[in-house]
Image: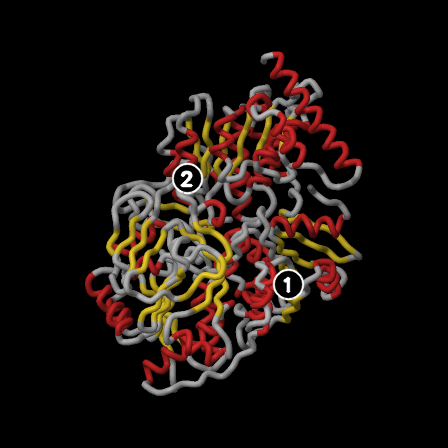
């Protein structure tokens, strides 16, 4: 590093650290984005300078759903090996967030202390990150329709990923979901070492393909794919009758693996993190043991208790995710008891500004549980309309609209009996707001 | 007893941005009025008879690849069936990608020009994979005749549509009447200030959100026309309680600084 570069790096790091301290001292929040933004302005080549200092390599985790849970599991496994990890746990997954994370593991001279950096990366930002970073692993979890207003379509994203990964050195290993046709196809067209994870459990097939499904057409020739069965959304066992494209062979046999938390979703997250850990050389017993003792990341099926009432927050940020959380609410609901659910729809940048996706969610299934539905958020009336149109004439739930979020939570709690669970289904920014109100701490 | 058959164009291929909401809205608004309603999915494997038998047609958006598959399937007898329905006055609502389908052709970002049905005198082109998409909230006033007059009678004021647009392709109109004039947003191409197209009883627009839940007057117009064309009699629909839709509209008008419209229905 040149002397000037070093000084400039020191200045950038020092300033960012001061900002972090101020933000935290004044209790303005967790300072997960702003310091990175400031430091980057002071030193544009900050990200590559930081990335190349990570001793055992950078692991990038991308995909629409499951980034935080997968990263957290992988981190927990690696920490059991006494590794030092830099990880953007707050979900700040744009460039500034990545820099902020790395800076927090960096001393005032710009020296970074981490064995691994696990970086959750926004789908659209991946190509940009790959210009500055030579990761040891790239983990591609899935590609669902999410925030299309910013990104365009699933096909386009996959093409951009391919263009960004191809020029990388052969030392990068790419870990992809075999059950996602778009990613399976991507993996079959990369020069790097590619390993796949996926399910091979026909007993988990869904009865029918849900409406919110994005890609059931062959990414190679455009012909309709034949599915032997679907596990979740468009993830399944498929082949193309026209060109012969088929699901890639997973490295691990999912039947032999335990899973974290609940749901098919988390089977995939487990396998993705497990495969990376195994490639790094960690023994399977340690991985299994960590999997069995794993606890949820915040907002991801997290449970809190307020005044003797349980609250479960189930992040619901896109059709596939929300369908899964509704499935979870239905499964957890005590038979015959009316439940209370608070749905909060925001349309800020991290949520996506287009809320039309709520019409791709099978909210009819939520309305059919009965009980009380409370609605709030920036786009409260859009969600209220969706729920109004979800009601069956002869099976109506009680729909309450509360513009003020605090009031909405209070009303929801009033409608929840002691010992019962209130389910909260928020979009991303709404989840942060909810936690701020419930726990009194903000995430900046 | 009156009943409606709603034909839904390629639901597994063309339902990208919550377009299903249009079908749900039409279905519920019929049910709330005790009008029996059937949803007929019109897919690749669907027989042509089903295409010729629908009283109302709904089409949604698609990704480029899916759009190509649809446009290659919707040819010959199927294309003719749809064309005849629209020419005889069967109402339809075509959002997002499906207006492109009704025009002469669509040029995708990559690949060959795809021929459309040629029912509407318009063409659509994608300016290339790196071109900016037209994304954001969109507001436009319906000006197409006689739709605008019909809606004015229904509403007692100028019909203003509120929605969200997200399209890479740009549409250019020939002799066909535009659906409306853009108040805020891009519209057909971000250049000429027009949004959508209107022909016979067919409404084509880039506006989703989806279109109908927050613009229920269009849903009611479609239902009314469908029944009138089918039963050859004039129809008066029962008014429904649309207070939630009204509030959703007011909230968006306020946010877009269009406060003068916030008082509209």
In the foreground, A219 or B82: B82
Q: Is residue A67 left or right of residue A107?
A: left
The answer to whether residue A378 shows anywhere in this view is yes
**Residue located 52% across and 25% down the image:** A133
Quarter occupied by residue B22 = bottom left
Q: Are dots 1 and 2 in contact, CB under 8 Å?
A: no
Q: Tell me if I can see residue A332 in this picture.
A: no
Q: Residue at x 43, y 31 (%)?
A: A164
Q: What secondary structure is marked by label 2?
A: helix
Specify the label residue A158 is tagged with: 2
- Label 1's element? strand
The chain letter under disc 2 is A
Asked if residue A294 is positioned above or below residue B26 in the image, the reply reads above
Residue A57: % across, % down? 55, 23
Quick one: label 1 or label 2, which is nearer the N terminus? 2
Could you tell me which quadrant the N terminus of chain B lies in?
bottom left
User: What is the chain letter for disc 1?
Assistant: A
Q: Which residue occupies the extreme front position in the image?
A: B192
Residue A185 lies left or right of residue A107; in this view the side is left
Q: At which x and y percent is residue A283?
A: 56, 26
Q: Residues within 10 Å of mark 2 (few under 14, many from 20)?
A: some
Q: Residue at x 43, y 21 (%)?
A: A169
* Residue corresponding to mark 1: A375
Residue B252 in percent (x, y) is at 57, 62
The mark total stands at 2
Disc 1 to disc 2, C-alpha distance: 35 Å
């Amino acid at each position: 590093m040149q002397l000037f570069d070093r000084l400039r790096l020191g200045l950038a790091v020092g300033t960012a650290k001061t900002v972090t301290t101020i933000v935290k001292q004044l209790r303005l929040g967790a300072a997960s984005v702003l310091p990175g933004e400031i430091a980057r302005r002071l030193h544009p080549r900050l990200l590559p300078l930081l990335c190349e200092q990570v001793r055992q390599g950078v692991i990038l985790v991308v995909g629409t759903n499951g980034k935080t849970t997968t990263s957290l599991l992988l981190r927990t496994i690696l920490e059991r090996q006494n590794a030092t990890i830099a990880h953007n746990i707050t979900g700040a997954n744009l460039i500034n967030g990545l820099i902020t994370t790395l800076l927090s593991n960096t001393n005032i001279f710009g020296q970074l202390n981490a064995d691994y950096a696990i970086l959750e990366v926004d789908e659209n930002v991946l190509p940009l990150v790959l210009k500055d970073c030579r990761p040891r692993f790239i983990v591609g979890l899935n590609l669902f329709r999410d925030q299309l207003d910013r990104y365009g379509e699933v096909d386009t994203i996959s093409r951009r990923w391919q263009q960004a990964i191809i020029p990388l050195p052969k030392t990068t290993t790419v870990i992809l979901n075999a059950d996602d046709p778009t990613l399976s196809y991507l993996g079959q067209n990369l020069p790097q070492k590619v390993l796949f994870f996926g399910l091979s459990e026909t007993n988990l097939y869904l009865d029918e393909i849900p409406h919110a499904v994005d890609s059931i057409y062959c990414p190679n020739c455009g012909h309709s794919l034949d599915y032997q069965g679907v596990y979740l959304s468009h993830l399944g066992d498929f082949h193309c009758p026209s060109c012969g494209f088929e699901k890639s062979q997973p490295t691990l046999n999912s039947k032999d693996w335990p899973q974290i938390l609940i749901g098919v979703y988390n089977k995939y997250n487990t396998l993705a993190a497990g495969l990376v850990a195994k490639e790094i050389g960690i023994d399977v017993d340690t991985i299994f043991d960590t999997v069995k003792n794993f606890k949820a990341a915040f907002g991801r099926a997290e449970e809190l208790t307020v005044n003797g009432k349980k609250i479960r927050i189930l992040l619901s940020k896109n059709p596939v995710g929300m369908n899964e959380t509704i499935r979870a609410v239905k499964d957890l609901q005590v038979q015959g008891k009316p439940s209370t659910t608070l749905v909060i729809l925001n349309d800020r940048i991290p949520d996506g500004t287009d809320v039309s996706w709520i019409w791709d969610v099978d909210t009819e299934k939520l309305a059919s549980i009965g009980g009380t539905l409370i609605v709030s958020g920036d786009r409260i009336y859009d969600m209220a309309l969706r729920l109004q149109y979800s009601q069956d004439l002869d099976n109506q739930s009680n729909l309450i609209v509360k513009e003020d979020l605090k009031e909405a939570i209070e009303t929801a709690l009033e409608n929840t009996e002691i010992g019962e669970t209130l389910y909260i289904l928020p979009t991303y920014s709404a989840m942060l707001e909810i936690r701020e109100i419930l726990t009194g701490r903000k995430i900046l | 007893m009156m009943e409606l058959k709603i034909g839904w164009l390629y639901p597994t291929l063309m339902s990208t941005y919550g377009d299903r909401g249009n079908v749900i809205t039409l279905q519920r608004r019929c049910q709330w009025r005790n009008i029996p309603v059937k949803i007929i999915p019109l897919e690749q494997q669907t027989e042509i008879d089903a295409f010729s038998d629908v009283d109302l047609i709904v089409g949604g958006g698609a990704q480029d690849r899916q759009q190509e598959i649809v446009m290659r399937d919707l040819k010959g007898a199927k294309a003719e069936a749809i064309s005849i329905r629209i020419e005889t006055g069967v109402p339809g609502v075509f959002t997002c990608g499906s207006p492109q389908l009704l025009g002469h052709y669509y040029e995708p970002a990559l690949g060959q020009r795809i021929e459309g049905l040629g029912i509407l005198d318009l063409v659509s082109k994608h300016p290339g994979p790196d071109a900016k998409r037209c994304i954001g909230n969109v507001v436009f006033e319906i000006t197409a005749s006689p739709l605008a007059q019909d809606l004015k009678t229904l509403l007692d004021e100028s019909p203003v549509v509120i929605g969200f647009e997200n399209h890479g392709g740009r549409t250019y109109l020939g002799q066909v009447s535009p659906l409306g004039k853009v108040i805020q947003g891009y519209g057909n191409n971000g250049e000429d200030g027009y949004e959508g197209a209107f022909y016979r009883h067919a409404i084509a627009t880039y506006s989703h959100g989806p279109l109908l839940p927050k613009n229920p007057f269009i849903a009611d117009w479609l239902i009314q026309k469908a029944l009138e064309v089918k039963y050859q009699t004039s129809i008066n629909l029962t008014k429904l309680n649309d207070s939630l839709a009204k509030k959703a509209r007011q909230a968006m008008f306020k946010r877009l600084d269009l406060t003068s419209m916030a008082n509209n229905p």
